[in-house]
Every structure is written in structure tokens, then in C-alpha cells.
Image (cartoon, grey):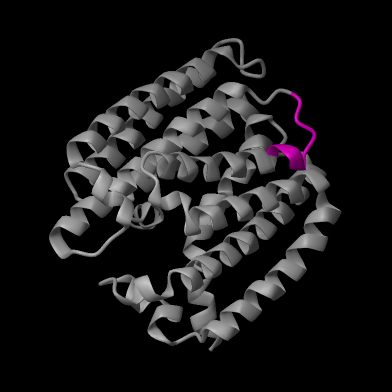
Amino acid sequence: MFPALLRAMRPKQWAKNILLFAALVFDRQLTNLPALLDTLAGFALFCLTASAVYLVNDLHDLEADRQHPTKRNRPIASGALPPRIAWAAVAVLVLVIVPLGWRLSPAFLAMLTAYFTLNVLYSVWLKHEPIIDVLVLASFYILRVGAGVVLIRVERFSPWLYVAMLFLALFLGIGKRRAELISLQANGGGRKVLQFYSQHFLDQLLIIVLTIAVMTYSLYTFTAPNLPENHAMMLTIPFVIYGIFRYLWLVQVGGHGEAPEDLLFSDRPLQVDLALWAAAVFVIFYLS
């Protein structure tokens, strides 16, 4: 039963929690060992919290998932993982997360609590509300960044990064809804909120948030207080533009986007672009 429980905890989704390292990297504290260790511990606890959320979500959507063409293969919906075991796992995770989160930082535990609570509200209510649903999806990414900020003593973390991340997260969330809408039209089933969307409307939203994401990141590269005076950070803008354009191509031409984390693990050009961007940021911040 353990393999089924592990699959239900969705470890592939943990890749999203790498955003906790944003404060560490962009505040130029990657070489600060205590801050690095705190962020690693926070990353582990956030992963466990996310897994508890996925279990609660699957338990709440059990009957709906059993009618879905692909979600019916999830461990709880398929019967591989009994609901009582899933609830027990949630209880154990909470008993582990709360004391460790408090010991790490009360503010960090507050972030974990907000993330968990908002996810539960999303599962039972907010995911059925058009526009609000994608705003809430984006807030999950911002909470990850904020959790990383409260873990360390941040000195010069630019607010432009929050804004850029907000619109990038909206870009991913809207792309997800667009892919789900296409899947609904082809296979049936899908979320109730999709009845309030059209492909044209979602495509318009994609262009709007894409434009603002590129603009706000560009503003960050020459306005943040802790960047090199030679504005070398602006050299990372092409990587960001290509990554966003590549993802837009995958969504609108390739028909992907329903699971953004799958694209991260499967699309080689996107992986290479992210690696080059990360390498450029590291060189500019720590070697120049």
C-alpha cells in the first residue's frame, strides 16, 4: 500500500516548491550556510504540506475523480489506497508538520497554514468560481516565495520579483485551464468551472499576463537594489522571454499545459532554457 500512498502524495509536484529558494538566491545568500539549511528544511516541510493537500483534495473529489477519464486512475479513486489510510496519512503529516514548522519559524508555520487552508477552500469552493480560481492558483506560487522570505533574514529582496512571479503564475494557471478546456471538448468530463470559459477568452488572458510578466521581470533586472551596477542582470531577459514563449507554444500549438510540472520534466528545450537562466543568474550574482 505504500507505493500507492506515495503516488497519491504526488512527489512530482514537489518541484513547484523550489520557489522557496527564490529569497535565498535573489537576496544573494546562497553561500550563507544557516540560511541554506533553514530553506532546505522549509522546502521539505512545504513538500509534506503539499502532499497533505493533495490527499485531502483527492478524498474530497473521490466520486468525481471516479468519473474522470484519467483521474480515475489516481490511487484513492482507483481503490489502490483506501480512504481511511489516506485520512490517517493526513493526520500523521499534520502532526509532523506543525511542531517542526513552529520550531523552524512561527511565521513560516503561518505560511504553511495559509497554504493548507486556502487549498482546502479551493478544493471545496473556490475552484468552481471563474477567474477567482486562477487567481487562487497563482496565490499558491506567491505563498511559496513568501515562505522562503520569512525563513531567512532578507535584506534586499525586490518586490518586483513578487509581481513578476504573480503574473508568471497566472500565465501557468490560465494555460492549465485552457488545456483542460481543450481536453473537455475532446473527451468530456472536466471541471465545472470550465463552462464559464471559452478558448478565445483564455487566449486573451494569456497574452495579457504574458506581457506584464515580461515587463515586470525586465523592470526588476535594472531597478532591484542588490544587482550589479553594470546592469548585467538584463542579460537574463532573453532566457525568460524564450521560456515563456516556449511554454505558450506548448499550450497553444502542442495542446499541453494541463499539468505544468509534466512539461518541466519532459520538454528538453524548456529544461535547457531554465538551466541556462539559472546559470546566468548564479554567475551574475555570485561570480561577477
Determine whether 92 is above or below 155 in the image.
below
Quadrant containing the C terminus is: top right
Determine whether 61 is above or below 81 in the image.
above
| Extreme residue in the right direction | 103
Determine whether 143 is above or below 101 in the image.
above
Between residues 178 and 245, which one lies in front from this camera angle? 178
Say which residue appears at 35% left-offset and 36% top-offset: 243
Between residues 117 and 37, which one lies in front from this camera angle? 117
| Residue 269 visible here | no
Q: Is residue 191 left or right of residue 48?
A: left
The x and y percentages for residue 23 are 66, 35
Say which residue appears at 62% left-offset and 54% top-offset: 117
Q: Is residue 247 left or right of residue 19?
A: left
Determine whether 121 is above or below 65 in the image.
above
The x and y percentages for residue 199 are 19, 41
The x and y percentages for residue 100 are 80, 60
| Extreme residue in the left direction | 186
Between residues 11 and 97, which one lies in front from this camera angle? 97
| Residue 47 visible here | yes
Q: Quadrant of residue 242?
A: top left
Between residues 219 and 85, which one lies in front from this camera angle? 85
Say which residue appears at 74% left-offset and 47% top-offset: 110
Q: Which residues are magenta?
A: 149-155
170 within the magenta span: no
Number of marks = 0
The x and y percentages for residue 130 are 36, 42
Say which residue appears at 29% left-offset and 71% top-offset: 68
